[in-house]
Image (tube, helix red, strand yellow):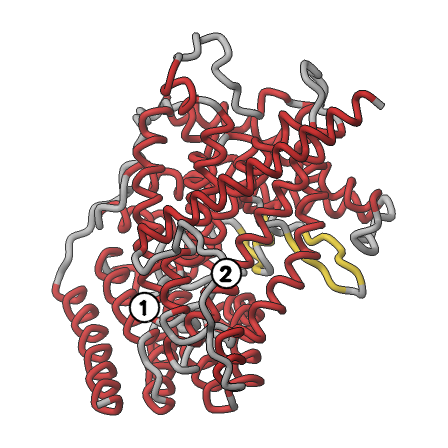
Amino acid sequence: MLVAHVRGHRIRAEELDEYARGSWLVRLDARAKLVGVLVFVVATALLTETRLVLASLALSVAFAAMSQVPPRHLAKAYLGALPFILVASASVFLFAGAERGVDMWARTSSCVLALLVLASGTETFDLFSGLRRLHVPAIMTTLLMLTYKFVLVMADEMARMTVARRARGFGGGRSLLDRRGLRLLSYTAGMVFVRSSDRADRTYEALKARGFDKEMRPMRATRVGALDGVFIAWFATSSALLLVMQLGVAG
Amino acid sequence: MHIPDGLMDPTVALTGWIEFLVVAAVALYMVRGRTSEKDIPRIAVLAAGVFVAQMLNFPVGGGTTGHLVGGALMAIMVGPVVAIMGMTVILIIQALLFGDGGVTALGLNAVNMAIIAPLSGWGVYTLLKPILAKKGDARFGPGASLAVGVGAWASVFLAASACAAELAVSYAVSGGAYGIAATVSVPAMLGYHAVIGVGEAAITVGVITYLWNVSPGAFAREASTTAKPSGLRGVLHSRVAQATVAVLIAFALALPLYFMYSAQGEDGLETVMTENGVEEGSAVLTSPFSYGESYFAALFAGILGFLATALMALALLRVLRGRESTD
């Protein structure tokens, strides 16, 4: 079983997709999910009034609760992104006041949570297929799919090399002046590149055997149905309401 | 350096998206023309490699750690255009799947880490290598290593400078609703990343040296077998010209922010003069050039200033190198 640690998230290959399969969101068209959630994220990023930002956060939490994605998984994923959120919020909190700091935390958390539910409630390759069907260039979506696949494999390889380094007594170096430590770390990264280079050639041969021609085809081609319409309408309406109220406050 | 959703003022985020889309469209066009289908898994592996290398924390000191950005590393390995694509892919995966960096801020994150970092890193490396490395030396010697290190450091420092400027401009144009004040963001970001850049430089030099010794095929080969075009085309095809353009693009991307910020009021000196009732007198010497009020006038002035500074620096380095060899 492949276990990868990606930027603080412990991921079993296919783990994200397992969560997706347990959620009703998986039945929706990936395009509808992307459009709905992105509209909501953009609207939230435009909010500056505290109660509206908190309302947006409440909507995100409600979306997460209804999604049937395990709360524990969402909490872990949110904790992975929390350092970025906290650095931004704490800076604003310290230098622009408590209210602005809370606004920043709530606004950023609302967006992150909505995106994490989208990612967890959608099979990864379905998400990239959705981007392709929203006319993101083929070369970009193909690169996304292949890179994601390689990240899982290479992160696993990196984790094994880290264990090997620790077993030989290397604890991560002391400071930027620790030349031996930095050399060891860079050679580890270099080794990952070398080992994966052969894998790229093998992957190309395998892709070619399956008829690859510069573009990965979607695994399944879903159609936008009534449920998708309701999903988009819900996000569009709530986003529009928040923005209208924001404009009312600003006016 | 990943900017989350809701941190930046919407106009600043929109400016980032526009800049990103323009540069990404050009990069896509160039990549399509230059790559075969066999190259696509290679680019993906490289992007995944940099993604994974970003997980490798290096010690900064005092119990803190930093991590690689990787823009310069990828650009030096395969060229800036492929690096822009690869870094963009990394940022999209991080934003969509892991919540690292926002979707509305993806434009700005891409400008900082997928455009400015690779272009400036590769540009500085390419400009410095012929000066610092011994001519005809097939090895990856100390001169080339120094060029890689300076390029990697510059890539992180300039990307962090852009990020600090974006935070400051957001704060200024939104009246404090978004972003972080320049008095905080600029010294904090620049001070921290000046140190982090040293780690980036050390790791990048280490990885490049390792790959150069173990797997030289990992690097993009220059088309040395094809005849070089002559005249103006020859100049445009030269690595120095391309590297100069790369660095200029990195600087040009910051200009809209400069205008948004400067439009908010007086600069520090002007403020002090106003507060103390000092009025500006007539200049003893008047420059034939002016920054001007329009984007293109300022861009032109910036290009002239950059070229003058770069030429003086290159001349100085050549003089120093000549003196070193006679010693």
In this rendering, position of residue B299 left or right of residue A222? right
**Residue A180 makes an appearance in the image:** yes
SS for dot 2: loop
**Residue A4 makes an appearance in the image:** no
> In the picture, which quadrant includes the N terminus of chain B?
bottom right
Question: Which residue is more in the foreground, A84 or B257?
Answer: B257
**Residue located 33% across and 57% down the image:** B17
> In the picture, which quadrant includes the C terminus of chain B?
top right
Residue B148 locus on image (x, y percent): 65, 36
Farthest residue toward the left? Answer: A226
Q: Amino acid at mark 2?
A: Val
Residue B216 locus on image (x, y percent): 63, 21
Q: Residues within 10 Å of mark 1 (few under 14, many from 20)?
A: some
**Residue located 23% across and 56% down the image:** A31
Task: Give the labeled residue for mark 2.
Answer: B284
- Mark 2 / mark 1, whichever is N-terminal: 1
Q: Amino acid at mark 1?
A: Thr
In this rendering, position of residue B115 left or right of residue A249? right
Count the labels in the image.
Answer: 2
Residue A56 locus on image (x, y percent): 33, 82
The chain carrying label 1 is: B
Give the image quarter of residue B138: top right
Give the image quarter of residue B64: bottom right
In this rendering, position of residue B149 left or right of residue B42? right
SS for dot 1: helix
Placement of A239 over or under A17, stated as above or below: below
Task: Give the labeled residue for mark 1.
Answer: B11
The chain carrying label 2 is: B
Q: Residues within 10 Å of mark 2 (few under 14, many from 20)?
A: few
